Image (spheres, rainbow, N blue to C red):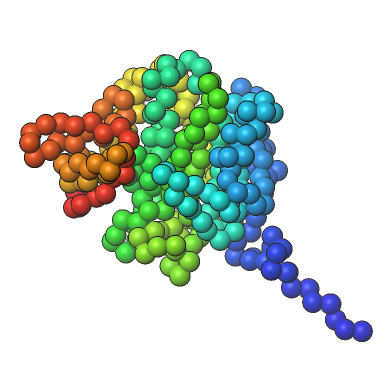
Amino acid sequence: MTPRDSSPSPDSRWSDLGRPPLNATALRRGLVRAGGLWTRVDVVQRTGSTNSDLVARAAEGTVAEGAVLVAEEQTAARGRLDRQWSAPPRSGLFFSVLLRPAEVPLSRWGWLPLLTGVAVATGLSRAAGVDTALKWPNDLLVTVGGEERKAGGILAESAGPDGVVVGVGLNVTLTAAELPVARAGSLALAGAATTDRDPLLRGVLRSLEDWYGRWRSAGGDPVACGLQETYAAGCATLGRTVRAELPGDRSLVGEAVAIDGDGRLVLATEGGRREPVGAGDIVHLRPA
């Protein structure tokens, strides 16, 4: 009789034992509780985009606020400006959450991606001992070999008139050889104290629940809840000379001097003007 090969197949979720799957049952037990924000946590092995899936579920009315959708692998993940985001299975945290901030004026909902950035940075500092800086408006930066590298990003999308889906993609165990571009990074390369994704995800979601609760209780006022000050303190863009690549093929160069009350980046230009930038791509031109 020929011995049966007991090694996992390439398609097995256990094929890479250095990257075990998330424990969905333990995540639900640790996050879903009466009176809490998180109402359900679903983990799928593979999907195109957790944001697209959760927006669709919200439109169908099958999920309530606080739904969390996590994927072990995304095949069509998107960043801002429809940029593609790819990573090996189980090498990161790829998840989306549904929020319905009914108490907050619509004019303040633009703070949600920035709030998520603060929450992720705070959660990672506690859970992994990694300092995560924020590049306006939605990039997560870590330091690898003395250089700032992008380890993650945030994308917020409308989920009907009363909801927002916020997605987070974060490189956790990517090696240098697996990085999609040289300027990318991961928590492992940044010297994280742990790369166990279960406590990392719990830490990030608990931090997000805390910051979202403060912001919502303050009616979305970023000053009253401390969000504006905290974001500015962790923003690697401030103090730098940057180029803002704006819609309509326009660009603006200046020193990033502030985050205003609407979450916009304020640039001081050579002409002495202060120009708020609410949308666009930011290129860091010199170190702070």
Residue lying at 67% horizontally and 28% vertically, measured from the top left: 60
**How many numbered badges does the structure rendering display?**
0
Name the image quarter holding residue 114: top left
Q: Quadrant of the N terminus?
A: bottom right
Q: Is residue 61 visible?
A: yes
* Residue 259 position in % (x across, y down): 26, 32
Residue lying at 64% horizontally and 42% vertically, measured from the top left: 27
Residue lying at 49% horizontally and 34% vertically, measured from the top left: 157
* Residue 4 position in % (x across, y down): 84, 77
Residue lying at 51% horizontally and 40% vertically, measured from the top left: 167
Name the side, left or right, on which 207 lies relative to 17: left
Residue sitting at the far left: 271
Name the image quarter holding residue 185: bottom left
* Residue 136 position in % (x across, y down): 32, 41
Q: Nearer the viewer, residue 85 or 81?
A: 81
Residue 82 in the image: above or below residue 86: above
Q: Is residue 132 visible?
A: no
Residue sitting at the far front: 248
Name the side, left or right, on which 78 lies relative to 49: left
* Residue 267 position in % (x across, y down): 19, 36
Name the image quarter holding residue 104: top left
Q: Nearer the viewer, residue 128 or 175?
A: 175
Residue 92 in the image: above or below residue 35: below
Residue sitting at the far bottom: 1
